[in-house]
C-alpha cells in the first residue's frame, strides 16, 4: 500500500545536508491509517521505513524480545529483528552484542520515549555496565550508525521488550539529528509506537520456532482449559499423540513446560490467530482457529 505525501504544517524541513528540498512528509492521519490496516509485516515495515526515510533516516532497526524482563535479555535465538541493514551487519551486531554498547539502548529498555545517541550515562539516569570497545565504535562508523536516536516503548506486560533505532544518513551530524528531534519528537514517537503495537500483534515466525498446525491446535485446546484426554477426544487422536504434539511444541519454542509454551506462543502470535497464515515451507496452510 502506498502512503500519500503532503506537506507538513510545522514549516520545518527533515534532515538534509544536500541543499535541495527533501520530499514532504506523509499526512500523519493517512499514514497511521495505512499502518493500522496493514495485514502483514512486510507491508507495515515498508511503510515505516519510507516514512522515516522522508525524515532523513537511512536505516531503521527494530528488535523485539518476547521473553525479556527489563534489562534481563532472553536468548538471541528468540529475537524478532527487522532492519534495513544488510544481514551480515545485523549478524555481527547480535553476535558481538554491539547493540548493548550504547547508553540510549539500555535507557530504552527501561523507559518510553526517544533518546539521542549523544546521551551520556549521567543524562540517562541508569547504571551503564557495558564497555564501549574500539571495535564497536569502528563497527558503528563503518556501517553509518554514528548519528541517530533510540526509541523505547510503554510496557504493557512484565515480559517482552522492544527497541527501535533510527540512523541518520551519512554526513548528517548528531547535532542535526537532535535539532530534528526537537521539532518532530512527538510525531516520531507516535509513529514508532503505533508501528510497534501493530508489528507485535502480527504473527512472526522466528526460524526454527514455527509451530505446526497440530502443535498450535493442541496448545489452543490447553489454553481453553482442556485436559489431555479431552483434547484426544476432540481431535480424534490418542492421548500419547497429544502428549507428543505438546512435547514437540515445547521443543520448537525452546521451553520446558507446556504453560510456558502457551505463553510464548501467545507472545509470538502463533496461537488464537484471527487470520489464516500463509503456507509454510512444506506448503501446509494453517486453518482458521475454531
Image: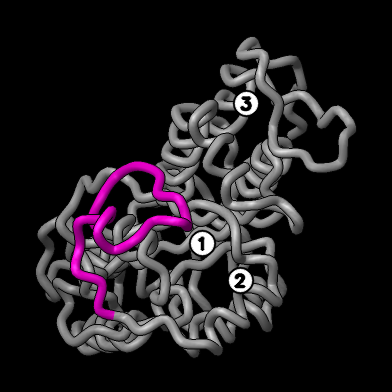
Mark-to-mark CA distance, 2 and 3: 31 Å
The nearer-to-camera label among 1 and 3 is 3
Element type at marker 2?
loop
Closer to the camera: disc 2 or disc 3? 3
Q: Earlier in the sequence, mark 2 or mark 3?
A: 3
What element does badge 3 sit on?
A: helix
Q: Quadrant of residue 10?
A: top right
Residue marked by disc 3: 31
User: Is residue 121 one of those drawn in magenta?
Assistant: yes
| Magenta span includes 239 | no
Q: Is residue 97 left or right of residue 125?
A: right
Residue 257 in view (yes/no): yes
Relative depth, front residue between 193 and 103: 103
Res 251 quadrant in image: bottom left
Residue where numbered disc 1 is placed: 286
Q: Is residue 288 visible?
A: no
Q: Do labels 1 and 2 touch, CB within 8 Å? A: yes
Mark 1 near mark 3, Cβ–Cβ under 8 Å?
no
On residue 280, the disc is: 2
Residue sitting at x 10%, y 59%: 225
Q: CA distance from mark 1 to mark 3?
A: 31 Å
Label 2 neighbour load within 10 Å: few <14, some 14-19, many 20+: few
Q: Nearer the viewer, residue 12 or 225?
A: 12
For disc 1, the neighbor class at 10 Å (few under 14, some 14 to 19, many from 20) is some
- Identify the residue at image location x=39%, y=75%: 100
The quadrant where residue 227 appears: bottom left
Query: Which color mode does the image show?
Result: one colour
Q: Position of residue 49 (x, y in %)?
A: 67, 47
Question: Relative to residue 177, is residue 196 drawn left or right?
Answer: left
Residue at the image position 58 percent from the left and 35 percent from the top: 180
Q: Which residues are magenta?
A: 110-129
Q: Tell me where residue 144 appears, x and y as whole percent.
A: 69, 66
Amino acid at each position: 500500500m502506498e502512503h500519500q505525501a503532503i506537506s507538513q504544517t510545522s514549516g520545518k524541513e527533515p534532515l538534509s545536508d544536500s541543499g535541495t528540498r527533501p520530499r514532504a512528509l506523509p499526512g500523519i492521519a493517512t499514514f497511521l491509517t495505512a499502518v493500522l490496516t496493514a495485514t502483514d509485516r512486510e507491508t507495515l515495515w515498508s511503510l515505516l521505513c519510507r516514512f522515516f526515510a522522508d525524515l532523513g533516516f537511512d536505516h531503521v532497526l527494530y528488535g523485539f524480545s518476547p521473553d525479556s524482563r527489563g534489562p534481563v535479555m532472553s536468548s538471541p535465538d528468540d529475537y524478532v529483528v527487522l532492519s534495513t541493514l544488510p544481514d551480515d551487519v545485523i549478524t555481527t551486531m547480535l553476535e558481538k552484542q554491539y547493540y548493548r554498547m550504547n547508553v540510549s539502548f539500555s535507557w530504552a529498555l527501561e523507559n518510553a520515549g526517544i533518546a539521542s545517541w549523544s546521551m551520556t550515562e549521567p543524562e540517562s539516569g541508569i547504571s551503564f555496565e557495558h564497555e564501549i570497545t574500539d571495535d564497536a565504535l569502528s563497527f558503528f562508523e563503518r556501517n553509518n550508525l554514528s548519528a541517530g536516536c533510540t526509541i523505547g516503548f510503554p510496557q504493557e506486560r512484565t515480559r517482552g521488550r522492544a527497541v527501535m533505532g533510527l540512523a541518520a544518513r551519512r554526513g548528517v551530524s548528531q547535532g542535526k539529528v537532535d535539532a530534528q528531534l526537537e521539532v518532530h519528537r512527538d510525531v516520531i514517537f507516535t509513529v514508532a509506537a503505533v508501528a510497534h503495537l501493530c508489528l507485535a500483534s502480527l504473527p512472526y515466525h522466528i526460524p526454527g520456532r514455527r509451530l505446526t498446525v497440530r502443535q498450535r491446535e493442541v496448545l489452543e485446546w490447553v489454553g481453553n482449559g482442556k485436559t489431555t484426554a479431552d483434547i484426544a477426544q476432540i481431535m480424534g487422536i490418542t492421548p500419547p499423540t497429544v502428549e507428543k504434539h505438546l512435547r514437540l511444541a515445547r521443543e520448537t519454542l525452546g521451553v520446558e513446560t507446556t504453560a510456558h509454551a502457551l505463553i510464548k506462543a501467545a507472545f509470538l502470535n502463533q496461537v488464537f490467530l484471527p487470520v489464516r497464515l500463509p503456507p509454510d515451507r512444506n506448503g501446509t496452510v494453517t486453518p482458521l482457529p475454531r
